[in-house]
Image (spheres, rainbow, N blue to C red):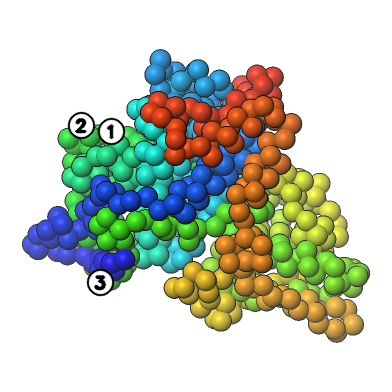
């Protein structure tokens, strides 16, 4: 790996193209690095994971709306939509939009956390859509996915967006563009322009994840993927981009992030070095914000230790800066304590999540979020008793450079009415790669079968799992085998009319 220093340069200093971060990203996207076998297998795991959560969300409002929009963009030769027959094709960018929304809706796919946040599985829908449209092979797709993960993970390590209240999709646009460029074997110059364009058009604020969180949280990465596809298309036609997009005097960094005195260090593999960043990412066992995964595990354990939950006086959660200020009481969002909050808000409230996990010793992607569940009196009482605190020890662990020592957990102290204190702590979720029971292929398959049960047939389930696990051997033009069909009667429609 090479650590690239990134800073702002005044216009009077013409920064050579080859010293710009976008060019360095494009160089590794266009190299001939051998694909790492473990990275290949993890890519297959993540395609299975994405399909699981996408199929489970097909009849949720945001997904229905995205699908209705995509349905207006039929093509004779194009890309597939989750749920529909693979014989029906749509515009690649609109397929990416609908499928990306389905993947993101339940907040239940993979994650990577470092200087900033990310859900790198969001790269996969636009890559599959373009791969289908241009009849690429399974190996082509794998190369693109592995590159996209590499770029996003390393941008997330080096550049913090959250500090400036910029949504993390600003790292997703460039990673999708780089992944598509790698999949299509585009030259460095074309990918360089596409990466810059993709960043320029995918910058948005974090208000989408603040206060009363709306369905835009599900749409945001799908929109970034769609815009990245269009950026690559323009770059392939010879169009340029704002440059240098990272280092320029009026660039992304200069005007939106740390400003003219900025100094970032972004790691990237050497040219032709195998890309393995996907192996540092982790999926979710539970449908909730990633920092909540370990706390759900703790809640399940404490349920067995505390015989009478009514005896609880208060609960204190000592955790990292990000957990406290984003999904804890440090966010100062009243909605995070409201039984009538949206599902999107509740899955960003560690107070609600921990209260339910403690009561139920379980977590369910639907049942744990119902209005009835959120309004249960005993839950509300527990919920209101919870306070989170930043503990610098946990913040340091959260940012540890060694993936084996990085943690997203907490120490929880439960105080009973009689003054007795019961504590429990966990550094990382049980399902984390370095947790008590890391997810393996069989866990991904189990998650897929659980979430798609009663939605797709066993025959379709078996067919998809066989195809995806054979991805390395899928020939050109066969990527539509990664699509999943459901019965026509299952799919619901959003009958509200729009422009399309």
- Which sits earlier in the primary sequence, circle 1 or circle 3? 1
What number of labels is visible?
3
Q: Closer to the camera: disc 2 or disc 3?
A: 2
Q: Which residue is mark 1?
A: 233
Label 1: how many Cα within 10 Å (few below 14, some 14–19, many 20+): some
Residue contact between numbered discs 1 and 2, judged by CB atoms under 8 Å = yes
- Distance, label 2 to label 3, CA atoms, is 35 Å
Task: Find the residue positioned furthest to the top.
Answer: 76
Identify which residue is drawn at 51% across, 78% down.
Answer: 396
The label shown at residue 63 is none
Callout 2 environment at 10 Å: few (<14), some (14 to 19), or many (20+)?
Answer: few
In the image, 410 versus 352, the foreground residue is 410
The mark nearer the N terminus, 2 or 3, is: 2
Q: Position of residue 417 (x, y in %)?
A: 88, 79
Q: Is residue 88 above or below residue 184?
A: above
- Front-lying residue, 65 or 20: 20
Which residue is tagged 2? 237
Identify the residue position indicated by label 3 in the image: 261
Would residue 110 be found to the left or right of residue 173 on screen? Answer: right
Residue at 20% in and 42% down:
187
Mark 1 against mark 3, which lies toward the viewer? 1
Identify whether 488 is placed above or below 116.
above
Dot 2 falls on a residue whose secondary structure is loop
Pointer 3 local density, CA inside 10 Å: few below 14, some 14–19, many at least 20: few
Give x and y (percent) for residue 200: 30, 47
Q: Name which residue lies at 33% across and 51% down.
A: 34
Q: Is residue 373 visible?
A: yes
Judge left or right: residue 105 versus residue 196: right
Mark 1–mark 2 Cα distance, whole angstroms, equals 7 Å
Mark 3, secondary structure of its residue: helix
Does the image show residue 289? no
């Amino acid at each position: 790996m090479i650590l690239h220093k990134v800073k702002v340069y005044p216009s009077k200093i013409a920064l050579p193209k080859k010293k710009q971060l976008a060019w360095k990203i494009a160089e590794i996207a266009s190299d001939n690095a051998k694909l790492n076998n473990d990275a290949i297998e993890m890519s297959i795991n993540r395609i299975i994971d994405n399909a699981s959560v996408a199929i489970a969300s097909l009849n949720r409002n945001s997904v229905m709306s995205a699908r209705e929009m995509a349905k207006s963009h039929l093509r004779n030769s194009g890309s597939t939509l989750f749920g529909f027959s693979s014989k029906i094709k749509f515009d690649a960018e609109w397929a990416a939009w609908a499928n990306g929304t389905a993947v993101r809706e339940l907040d239940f796919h993979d994650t990577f956390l470092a200087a900033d946040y990310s859900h790198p599985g969001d790269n996969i829908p636009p890559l599959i859509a373009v791969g289908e449209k241009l009849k690429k092979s399974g190996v082509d797709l794998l190369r693109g996915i592995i590159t996209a993960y590499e770029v996003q993970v390393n941008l997330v390590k080096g550049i913090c967006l959250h500090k400036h209240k910029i949504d993390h999709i600003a790292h997703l646009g460039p990673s999708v563009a780089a992944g598509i460029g790698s999949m299509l074997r585009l030259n460095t110059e074309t990918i360089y322009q596409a990466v810059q364009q993709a960043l320029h058009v995918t910058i948005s604020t974090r208000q989408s994840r603040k206060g009363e969180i709306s369905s835009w949280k599900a749409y945001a990465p799908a929109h970034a993927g769609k815009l990245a596809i269009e950026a690559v298309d323009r770059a392939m036609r010879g169009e340029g981009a704002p440059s240098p997009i990272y280092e320029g005097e009026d660039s992304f960094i200069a005007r939106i992030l740390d400003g003219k005195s900025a100094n970032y260090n972004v790691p990237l593999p050497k040219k032709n070095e195998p890309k393995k960043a996907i192996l540092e990412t982790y999926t979710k066992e539970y449908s909730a914000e990633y920092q909540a995964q370990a706390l759900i595990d703790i809640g399940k354990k404490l349920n067995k230790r505390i015989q009478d939950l009514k005896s609880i006086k208060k609960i204190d959660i000592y955790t990292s800066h990000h957990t406290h200020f984003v999904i804890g009481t440090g966010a100062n969002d009243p909605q995070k304590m409201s039984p009538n909050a949206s599902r999107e808000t509740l899955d960003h409230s560690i107070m609600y999540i921990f209260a339910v996990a403690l009561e139920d010793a379980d977590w369910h992607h639907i049942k744990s979020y119902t209005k009835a569940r959120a309004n249960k009196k005993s839950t509300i009482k527990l919920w209101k008793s919870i306070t989170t605190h930043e503990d610098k020890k946990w913040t340091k662990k959260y940012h540890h450079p060694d993936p084996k020592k990085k943690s997203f957990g907490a120490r929880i102290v439960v105080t009973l009415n009689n003054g007795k204190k019961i504590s429990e702590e966990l550094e990382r979720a049980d399902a984390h790669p370095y947790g008590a029971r890391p997810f393996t292929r069989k866990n991904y398959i189990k998650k897929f079968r659980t979430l798609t049960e009663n939605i797709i047939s066993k025959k379709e389930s078996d067919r998809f799992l066989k195809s995806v696990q054979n991805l390395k051997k899928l020939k050109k033009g066969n990527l539509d085998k990664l699509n999943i069909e459901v019965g026509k009667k299952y799919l619901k429609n959003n009958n509200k009319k729009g422009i399309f």
